[in-house]
């Protein structure tokens, strides 16, 4: 039984005016079920999305407009349900409901498609991918990339044309075995872990146990750190110093990167209630997110992990889209290892960087919350995932302004924006106005040559 939801006038207006996008598509009921499956395939192979069937676009005097043209009854849509059942017999990848309006006739079919772990094919046997508001067929030569994106195929198992001595006679493997398996012989142990296959080391083996993986896998085995003296965009003019590149086997790469990022962050300052204060990000959050970026990145992409340190935030960019069924929305509630062999083997170290496997993102969220900072923000681009740690408190802008005035006589718009993380001067003015209306703030009389400022009202 499919539920029916009645929508009110305001919701109806929003639906008819919604912009088609990477996550939303509107279709007329005359759409053929076969073409309908192309949209399902496109959403399932990208980040998921919503389809509304029964909304038609027609030409009008002022251009195209949308009208509600729903199904007469549920049986009229049987062909759509049939193809959905054929594609997903267990009903685990998409769900549906009917939308009804007291102002319009007929029913609109609302389908929610989840991002799938496998490649999802339309009824024509082709895979499609959602790109902005388009459903594009995946070319044969692009199927491999889609497999890497979804984590169906992992680059960590690719064999490399280098001598096995790169990992059987390295300092990295000898130190590791002496600490964890003193009786182990490098060659036999590495073959047993399938990081040497057919007498060739794999990508995972080189990344973990070569002393210089960057020489064998350039642009795939380093963390690049850039410090920008700005709160805006990453532009070369704002670089405080030359970019730094951290290299080495994955274990030391993670710990060395976290140590260097911590050193840079500890030099940063911002305006606080009692003047200039050191910026503090929880080390656990930085550690977990760097670990996540290094272990779960797509190694088929020739690009380094990038860490961009700004005056008010840290951005960590990891090459590759989110794997499998992972999305920006469920990243803190689900697990999927794009490189399971790397994840498993690095956890064998005495002090592994991924101590609680699968809990890294949650740890980062909790660490930020303990310092009353906003939770990490994840954004997925066409070729990477960017997580941002912002130095913005969970307290309201009004609370921060009043707290600042407990120790200072007055506050300007610029100081308040630095304090709250608000970018717009007008938005900050509205905070001042709200405080003035409640009698908690007054404007300092304007003095020539000084900027407008605000203060607490004098006691009566």
Image (spheres, rainbow, N blue to C red):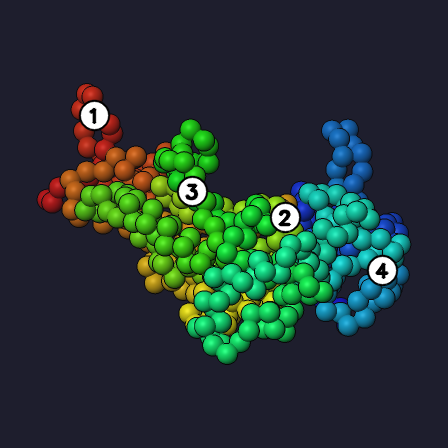
Task: Determine which residue is flagged by label 4.
Answer: 80
Asked if labels 2 and 1 touch by Cβ distance under 8 angstroms, the answer is no
Work out how far the residue at label 1 is from the one at label 2, CA to CA, in angstroms.
53 Å
Q: Position of residue 429 (x, y in %)?
A: 34, 36
Q: Earlier in the sequence, mark 1 or mark 2?
A: 2
Of residues 220 and 168, the one drawn nearer to the viewer in this rendering: 168
Identify the secondary structure beneath mark 3: strand
Quadrant in the rendering for residue 256 = bottom left
Quadrant in the rendering for residue 372 = bottom left
Q: Position of residue 419 (x, y in %)?
A: 30, 44
Give left or right: position of 460 versus 223.
left
Task: Determine which residue is flagged by label 1.
Answer: 450
Does 230 sit above or below residue 313?
A: above
Give left or right: position of 19 versus 54.
left
Work out how far the residue at label 2 is from the one at label 4, CA to CA, in angstroms.
38 Å
Quadrant in the rendering for residue 96 = bottom right
Asked if labels 1 and 3 touch by Cβ distance under 8 angstroms, the answer is no
Of residues 70 and 199, the one drawn nearer to the viewer in this rendering: 199
Would you call the spot at circle 1 few (<14 residues within 10 Å), some (14-19), or many (20 or more)? few
Residue drawn where x is 45% and y is 72% of the image: 178
Identify the secondary structure beneath mark 4: helix
Q: Earlier in the sequence, mark 3 or mark 4?
A: 4
Work out how far the residue at label 3 is from the one at label 2, CA to CA, in angstroms.
20 Å
Of residues 362 and 51, the one drawn nearer to the viewer in this rendering: 362
Work out how far the residue at label 3 is from the one at label 1, CA to CA, in angstroms.
41 Å
Task: Determine which residue is flagged by label 2.
Answer: 301
Task: Determine which residue is flagged by label 3.
Answer: 244
Q: Earlier in the sequence, mark 3 or mark 2?
A: 3
Q: Residue furthest top?
A: 448
């Amino acid at each position: 039984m499919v539920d029916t939801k009645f929508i009110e006038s305001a919701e109806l207006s929003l639906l008819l005016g919604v912009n088609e996008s990477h996550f939303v598509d509107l279709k007329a009921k005359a759409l053929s079920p076969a073409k309908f499956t192309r949209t399902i395939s496109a959403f399932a192979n990208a980040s998921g999305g919503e389809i509304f069937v029964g909304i038609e676009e027609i030409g009008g005097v002022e251009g195209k407009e949308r009208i509600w043209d729903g199904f007469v009854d549920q049986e009229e849509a049987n062909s759509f349900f049939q193809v959905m059942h054929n594609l997903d017999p267990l009903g685990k990848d998409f769900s549906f409901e009917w939308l009804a309006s007291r102002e319009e006739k007929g029913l609109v079919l609302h389908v929610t498609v989840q991002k799938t772990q496998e490649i999802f094919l339309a009824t024509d046997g082709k895979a499609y991918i959602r790109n902005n508001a388009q459903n594009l067929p995946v070319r044969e030569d692009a199927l491999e990339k889609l497999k890497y994106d979804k984590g169906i195929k992992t680059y960590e198992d690719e064999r490399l044309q280098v001598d096995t001595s790169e990992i059987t006679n390295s300092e990295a493997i000898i130190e590791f075995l002496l600490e964890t398996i003193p009786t182990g012989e490098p060659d036999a142990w590495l073959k047993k872990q399938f990081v040497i296959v057919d007498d060739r080391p794999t990508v995972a083996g080189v990344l973990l146990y070569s002393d210089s993986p960057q020489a064998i896998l350039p642009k795939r085995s380093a963390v690049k750190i850039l410090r920008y003296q700005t709160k805006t965009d990453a532009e070369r003019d704002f670089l405080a110093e030359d970019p730094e590149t951290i290299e080495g086997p994955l274990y030391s790469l993670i710990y060395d990167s976290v140590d260097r990022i911590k050193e840079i962050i500890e030099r940063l300052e911002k305006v606080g209630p009692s003047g200039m204060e050191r910026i503090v990000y929880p080390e656990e959050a930085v550690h977990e997110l760097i670990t996540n970026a290094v272990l779960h990145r797509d190694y088929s992409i020739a690009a380094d992990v990038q860490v961009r340190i700004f005056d008010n935030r840290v951005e960590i960019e990891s090459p590759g889209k989110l794997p499998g069924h992972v999305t920006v929305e469920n990243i803190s509630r689900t697990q999927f290892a794009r490189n399971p062999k790397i994840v498993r083997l690095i956890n064998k170290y005495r002090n592994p960087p991924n101590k609680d496997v699968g809990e890294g993102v949650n740890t980062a969220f909790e660490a930020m919350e303990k310092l009353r900072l906003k939770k990490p923000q994840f954004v997925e681009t066409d070729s990477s995932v960017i997580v941002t740690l912002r130095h913005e408190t969970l307290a309201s802008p009004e609370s921060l302004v009043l707290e600042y005035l407990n120790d200072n006589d007055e506050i300007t718009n610029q100081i308040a924006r630095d304090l709250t993380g608000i970018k717009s001067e007008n938005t900050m003015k509205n905070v001042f106005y709200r405080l003035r209306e409640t009698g908690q703030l007054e404007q300092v009389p304007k003095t020539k040559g000084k900027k407008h400022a605000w203060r607490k009202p004098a006691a009566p």
